[in-house]
């Protein structure tokens, strides 16, 4: 297994590739296509990605952010928005420490949102390469410690035997799958993540 340091080598290139792949996926569907984000269309998701690139917290949360995104959708046709997303540099630091973490947060955003669009539309992608697989495994642990603080004793695992304890305490729940699928589960995409969830608690 690669060390965390080696897993992060070249993450900027992985991020750029996922950025392009996400934009290409958006370009293949209609603006009103459903996504794995409940209540969001492809147009909503494209506007969300554009808002992240503004590096302005006012775009991210609250009623003001929803108004800005709504205005963006009225101002830019879907095709124009996707073209702008594709033309702008992939790097963004949507979390303060992301630039010091080789942009793993934004890599996760591009990967997950690309799958949000691809899977409901039946768009498949080739198997992940080893470098992306490792980077997503690192990201899965990072994100789970923020997004999956409960239940205690959560363990993430892969079919090849890797595992990482996310929350403290005796193991109570194990989620097993390839790193890309585990990342989807961690990000709340339980409707599309191809994982096995086991209850380890004793009766």
Image (tube, rainbow, N blue to C red):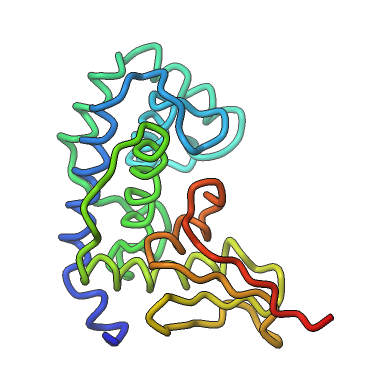
x, y percent for residue 103: 30, 62
Residue 128 lies, in percent from the top left, at: 24, 61
- Residue 201, located in which quarter of the rendered image? bottom right
- The quarter of the picture where residue 85 lies is top left
Name above or below for residue 134 compared with residue 118: below
**Residue furthest right as drawn:** 203
Q: Position of residue 30 (x, y in %)?
A: 33, 19
The one nearer the camera, 94 or 167, is 167
> In the image, what residue occupies the spot 58% across and 61% down?
147
Q: Nearer the viewer, residue 130 or 100?
A: 130
Q: Is residue 167 left or right of residue 144?
A: right
Q: Nearer the viewer, residue 11 or 34?
A: 34
Residue 115 falls in which quadrant of the image? Answer: top left
Q: Residue at x 69, y 73 (%)?
A: 199
- The answer to whether residue 59 is left or right of residue 110 is right
* Quadrant of the snapshot with the N terminus: bottom left
Q: Residue at x 42, y 57 (%)?
A: 95
At which x and y percent is residue 104? Answer: 33, 63
Q: Quadrant of the C terminus?
A: bottom right
How many numbered badges does the structure rendering display?
Answer: 0
Residue drawn at the location 27% of the way across and 24% of the way down: 81
Q: Is residue 201 above or below residue 136?
A: below
- Taking the image as shown, residue 93 lies to the left or right of residue 83, namely right
């Amino acid at each position: 297994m690669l060390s965390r340091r080696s897993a992060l080598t070249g993450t900027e290139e992985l991020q750029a590739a996922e950025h392009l792949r996400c934009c290409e996926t958006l370009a293949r569907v209609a603006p009103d296509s459903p996504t794995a984000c409940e209540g969001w269309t492809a147009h909503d998701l494209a506007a969300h990605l554009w808002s992240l690139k503004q590096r302005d917290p006012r775009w991210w949360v609250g009623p003001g952010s929803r108004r800005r995104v709504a205005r963006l959708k009225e101002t830019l046709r879907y095709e124009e928005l996707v073209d702008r997303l594709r033309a702008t540099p992939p790097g963004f630091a949507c979390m303060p420490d992301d630039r010091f973490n080789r942009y793993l947060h934004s890599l996760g955003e591009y990967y997950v949102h690309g799958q949000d669009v691809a899977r409901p539309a039946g768009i498949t992608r080739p198997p992940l390469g080893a470098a992306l697989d490792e980077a997503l495994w690192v990201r899965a642990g990072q994100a789970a410690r923020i997004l999956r603080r409960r239940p205690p004793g959560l363990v993430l695992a892969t079919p090849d035997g890797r595992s990482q304890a996310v929350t403290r305490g005796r193991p109570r729940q194990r989620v097993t799958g390839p790193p890309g699928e585990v990342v989807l589960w961690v990000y709340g995409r339980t409707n599309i993540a191809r994982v096995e969830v086991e209850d380890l608690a004793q009766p």
